[in-house]
Image (cartoon, rainbow, N blue to C red):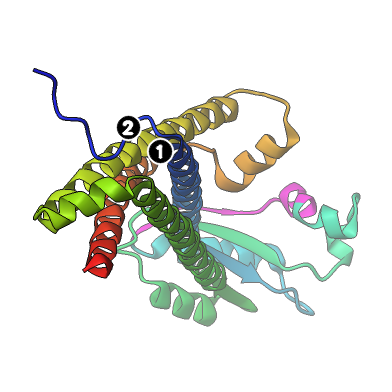
Amino acid sequence: MRPPAPIVPPQAVAGRALTLVVAIMSFLACLTVGAVTVIHEAATDWSNDLVREVTIQIRPAQGLDMLREIDKAIEVAERQPGVGRVAALSDDQTRALLQPWLGAGLDLDTLPVPRLVQVAVDDVTAFDLGALRQAVSDEVAGASVDDHSNWTDRLAAMANAVVLAGIAILALVLGSMVLSVVFATRAAMAGNKDVVEVLHFVGAEDSFVAREFQRHFLLLGLKGGIAGGVCAIVVFVVLGLLADEATGFAAMEQAMALFGGASVGVAGYLGVLAIIFLVTILTAATSRLAVRAHLRRID
């Protein structure tokens, strides 16, 4: 016995077109999630690195013995709990920092250049920034402590802005997909108008008709979501391989220097799975609501 023919033909041209549209939208949504994940993780790493290091800055002054003050600053920092390695920047390191702005061959003895002491924090919970700042102010002439709070605040603001922008882009992409599903559902119902109306007037429940369309579009959404997600995963893997190798691409080298790599990590791949699930559910739910709205208009 042959199974009953479905209300919505599974191989309709509109169905294939919708599958392609859903795949493209899923691909763009997955790329957005991956990009947000990479940037957010990079910003978090930068913030953690800055939190684990503070800088003591000693400003030059008339009659100030810079070497003695540097030694005192190192001694003060090493006494603080939670502090690890403490080291002053050498003359060569200071020249390297100033070279992009002042050029090479600088004579530090003739320039009023502040000297820097880097303090690495091993135990953030035990470290007391206020105590270090007070001790440096009391014992080291012309010195101050920079905890890079301005940079960490800017990084946090940037990460939050990227997340919000990603959410906005994701909402636009998913909204466009929902509209496409609504139009495709209406087109499918228009193409099967006689069948739908006959079923409706002979007493078929609206839930039965809506369920048939929902099943059809659920499969389309699943196929499109998987296709878009797989393409996005391929892009992530290729970018990860390019980031791990010396490709010679200037753009990739700049991205690695800025973000420390292009791998989306576990969070990015979980985001792809979430997008596939969300796209599938949205496609099925949207088609069901569109069918029910159309059937109410028939009444």
Q: Position of residue 156 (x, y in %)?
A: 48, 67
For mark 2, what is the residue? 10
Query: Left or right of 20: which side holds 287?
Result: left
Mark carried by residue 90: none
The image quadrant of residue 124 is bottom left
The residue positioned 21% from the left and 69% from the top of the image is 299
The residue positioned 56% from the left and 71% from the top of the image is 146
Q: Position of residue 109 (x, y in %)?
A: 85, 62
Q: Nearer the viewer, residue 264 or 11?
A: 11
- Residue at the top extreme, as displayed: 1
Residue 278 visible in the shown view? no
For mark 1, what is the residue? 15
Q: Looking at the image, is mark 1 or mark 2 earlier in the sequence?
A: 2
Q: Position of residue 210 (x, y in %)?
A: 20, 52
Type of amino acid at the residue the image marks with label 2: Pro
The residue positioned 48% from the left and 43% from the top of the image is 21
- SS for callout 2: loop
Q: Nearer the viewer, residue 249 or 276?
A: 276
The image quadrant of residue 293 is bottom left
Magenta-highlighted residues: 82-96
Q: Assess whether mark 2 and mark 1 are in contact (beta carbons under 8 angstroms).
A: yes
Query: Left or right of 51: which side holds 57?
Result: right
The residue positioned 76% from the left and 47% from the top of the image is 92
Residue 86 among magenta residues: yes
Type of amino acid at the residue the image marks with label 1: Gly
- SS for callout 1: helix
How crowded pointer 1 is (Cα within 10 Å; few <14, some 14-19, many 20+) is rated as: many
Q: CA distance from mark 1 to mark 2?
A: 7 Å
Residue 272 among magenta residues: no
